[in-house]
Image: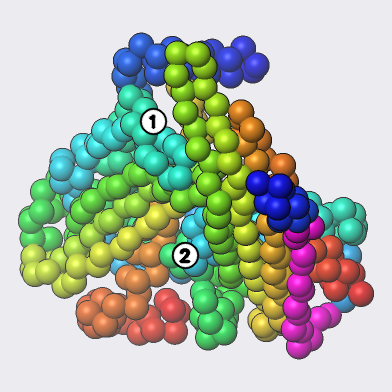
Amino acid sequence: MKTKKYLTLFTTLFLFMVGCSFERTLKLDARLSRPPAVKQIPLRIGVYYNPEFTDFTKKLELIGCGPNGRKDKSGIFFTFTIGEASKDLFDQCISSMFTAVLQIPSPRHCSNHASSIDGWLEPKIESFNWETICSNDFFSQGRIVARVVYSVNLYGCDGRLVTSIESIGSSSEHPKVCLTKDCKDSLATEQAMQDAMAKFMIDFYDQPEVQQWLSSHIVVPPAGSLQ
Amino acid sequence: MRSLSPLMAYFLISLCFSACTMVRYQTEFSSLAKLMPSDTIVLLSNLESTQRFDDNDVDKCIGSSMRHANPELIFVSAKQFRENLYPYFMPSTTPNSLEGYKSILDKSEVQQRITTLGVRYLVILVKSDTLTDWHGGIFCGAGYGGGGCLGLSWWDRKSDFGFVIWDLQTKQYVGNVGAKAAGTGIMPAFGLPIPFYVPATEAAVCKDIGSRLAELLSR
């Protein structure tokens, strides 16, 4: 363990001294350890994943903090595989929101699909930001802040857009730079994704358009049981 | 020049005297039931209101002094609590009002998970402000023969922390605790700038709130 720490420190110092850059792809896994504490809506829902969503990645440079909040480039770059991890998390969340979830290959009318569904969802990643916030004092300290914005479109069976729900998630943590391959830290990104998805799950039930749409699809009004 | 020396000495001595850290504490409780042996406590940060202090920071802040003051207190980790209560109590979905708490705690699926965890009291951070104001100045220079710094800097640091306590079983607001601390740090530079005194205002506030909270919950 100590050897690894020294190796990381040595590599960072060496890269800094020779002015080289370093790149690492973060393997993100934002799946929840427990199913969410929500009641299921008795509906069959389709989900369409646009390749733009599942393939979404972003490469960003780590910024360090100098005296009095000065921001210094580190030459260390991280590639965040947001799309793949968002898909896994979204799958898990909607599976606990609806009694049946079916992945559909194309955004078409429900009648075009072999299994009947009541409507379908299409998630999108609007933006992802990851930065270091430095305190302004002489002994400046930094915090890593991750922020992700999703929008989820709900379509009815006729292909009509029922509503679009935007959810913003953020998280912050003390920087723990890890350059070895077996690093499991997500540098606040997984928490930001989980936060945004939590916001979506709660907001989904509160949308008047969704409630109206739900009341036309399920016999028992959902208001009391879903809130 | 001679008349300046006593003045300078007086100034330095005054700074040294004001360099201690002073803490003021305030509390307000409506009802606080005695903890049963199976009751547990969870300490959370409210990341929407204060991004600088996460759950681990809160645990380090008041958790350690609470455990020190009363080793019999049982805690549920913030991670375990958030995992069990998802999608509630995430940074964007943590309630901030009495109505918000009631609407979440009224849900049967939420109550079921709280009962399983045995959480009685939720202690949540609502304020964590630390302000630092720098004075004086240090001048540094370097040449072929060497380099160094000369001067004096001091800084006033103020920390203001506040926590709110909720009873998750009776679904009631219990009260709030807060503390403020102020201190002055000194860093003279005669060659190298070396901090003479660093005011640990945050540590002082944390220790004070933690020990008092442990005392209140142990009554």
Instruction: Please name the residue shown 89% across and 58% down the image.
Output: B69
In percent of the image, x 57 and y 36: which residue is there?
B150
In this rendering, position of residue A49 left or right of residue A71: left
Position of residue A64 measured from the top left corner of the image (x, y, whole percent): 42, 35
Q: Is residue B189 left or right of residue A167?
A: right
What residue is pinned by disc 1?
A: A27
Image: B189 above or below A164: above
Q: Nearer the viewer, residue A116 or B167?
A: B167
* Res B61 visible: no
Q: Is residue B109 magenta?
A: no
Q: Chain of mark 2?
A: B
Q: Are marks 1 and 2 on the same chain?
A: no
Identity, as a three-letter code, of the amino acid under mark 1: Lys
Task: Choose between A76 and B194: the one closer to the eye.
Answer: B194
The residue type indicated by label 2 comes to Glu
Residues rendered magenta in the picture: B14-33
What element does badge 1 sit on? loop
Which quadrant of the figure contains the N terminus of chain A?
top right
Determine which residue is flagged by label 2. B48
